[in-house]
């Protein structure tokens, strides 16, 4: 046996040993994960993410995946000649666009994520917020068109899947009480589901390393009051606004903590949950 092989094995054993307290800490915990950005940009990244999710499930953690798909939606809308723009980080979605959005999110994209999880030995099941009336919403803002804001989460379908050892993979599509279809910001939907389930953690995977301060440096940990201050000072802006607003709302409704992290980092979810070295910005009511 070569020396470097022995060193690798020793390092692996040490890492597993150090993870034990965290494995115990998150035993049977509900972890809601919003999948987006680089984590789903190619097969290699998606396979790595799926492997982490299956490992979490094997460690008796209950992961629930809500995915976005912004770049894929953009490509589909452009292909069909449908123009689009954003307001405060949310896509304006008219009646023609919402049909394409649903086709992209609840079709191949959702099934690709499910297939990746299943190929790693997991039991992924793809659903949308329309299944079993999981997510009932109302119009978010008149200027946004068919963009919904969740007002009711019926958690029975999710809990039934989790209790039967399945990993739910949910596309951010919902309906209003009249049965109309709405596109829902994936961060917002993940926060609403996490709140309804009183999740232990909400992980928002994105393309940036976390929330930045006025100097452009990543904030490791922040209490809610600090996040609200940064919003008021316009330091947090653009596409980060829906994410931090999701974090604020989720924590105020019972989610223990929210982490905004870079999904392109290898094993980002495992590093965040099972090591001392968090890889994103941890937001809580108060920071110890």
Image (cartoon, rainbow, N blue to C red):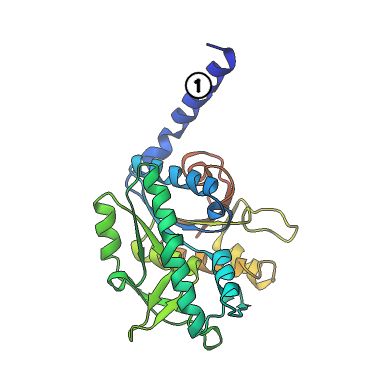
Q: Quadrant of residue 233?
A: bottom right
> Taking 259 as reference, is 182 left or right?
left
**Residue 58 in sight in this render:** yes
Q: In the figure, 54 relative to 88: above or below?
A: above
User: x%, y% of residue 130?
Assistant: 34, 73
> Taking 82 as reference, is 179 left or right?
left
Outermost residue on the top side: it is 1
User: x%, y% of residue 269?
Assistant: 49, 47
**Residue 200 in sight in this render:** no
Q: In the figure, 87 relative to 22: above or below?
A: below
Outermost residue on the right side: it is 215
User: x%, y% of residue 248?
Assistant: 51, 66
Q: Read off the residue under disc 1.
A: 9
Residue at the spot x=54%, y=47% of the render? 45
Residue at the spot x=47%, y=68% of the render? 104
> Taking 194 as reference, is 206 left or right?
right
Q: Quadrant of residue 172?
A: bottom left
Q: How many marks?
A: 1
Outermost residue on the bottom side: it is 142
Q: Quadrant of residue 5?
A: top right
Residue at the spot x=69%, y=67% of the render? 235
Task: Say what secondary structure mark 1 lies in.
Answer: helix
Residue at the spot x=30%, y=74% of the render? 133
Q: Residues within 10 Å of mark 1 (few under 14, many from 20)?
A: few
Q: In terms of depth relative to the viewer, which is nearer, 78 or 227?
A: 78
User: x%, y% of residue 216?
Assistant: 73, 57
């Amino acid at each position: 046996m070569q020396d470097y092989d022995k060193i690798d094995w020793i390092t692996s054993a040490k890492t597993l040993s150090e993870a034990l307290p965290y494995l115990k800490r998150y035993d049977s915990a509900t972890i809601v994960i919003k999948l987006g950005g680089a984590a789903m940009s190619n097969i290699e990244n998606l396979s790595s993410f799926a492997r982490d999710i299956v490992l979490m499930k094997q460690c008796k953690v209950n992961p629930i995946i809500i995915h976005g798909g912004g770049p894929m939606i953009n490509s589909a809308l452009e292909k069909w000649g449908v123009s689009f723009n954003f307001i405060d980080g949310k896509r304006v979605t008219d009646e023609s666009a919402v049909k394409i959005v649903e086709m992209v999110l609840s079709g191949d994209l959702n099934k690709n994520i499910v297939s990746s999880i299943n190929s790693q030995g997991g039991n992924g099941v793809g659903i949308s917020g329309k299944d079993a009336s999981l997510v009932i919403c109302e119009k978010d803002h008149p200027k946004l068109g068919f963009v919904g804001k969740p007002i009711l989460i019926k958690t029975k379908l999710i809990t039934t899947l989790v209790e039967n050892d399945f990993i739910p993979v949910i596309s951010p599509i919902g309906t209003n009480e009249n049965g109309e279809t709405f596109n829902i910001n994936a961060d917002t939907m993940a926060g609403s589901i996490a709140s309804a389930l009183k999740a232990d953690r909400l992980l928002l995977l994105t393309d940036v390393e976390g929330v930045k301060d006025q100097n452009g440096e990543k904030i490791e940990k922040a209490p809610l009051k600090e996040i609200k201050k940064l919003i008021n000072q316009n330091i947090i802006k653009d596409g980060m606004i829906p994410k931090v607003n999701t974090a604020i709302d989720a924590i105020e409704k019972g989610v223990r903590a929210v982490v905004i992290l870079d999904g392109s980092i290898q094993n980002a979810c495992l590093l965040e949950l099972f090591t001392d070295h968090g890889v994103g910005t941890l937001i809580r009511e108060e920071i110890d």
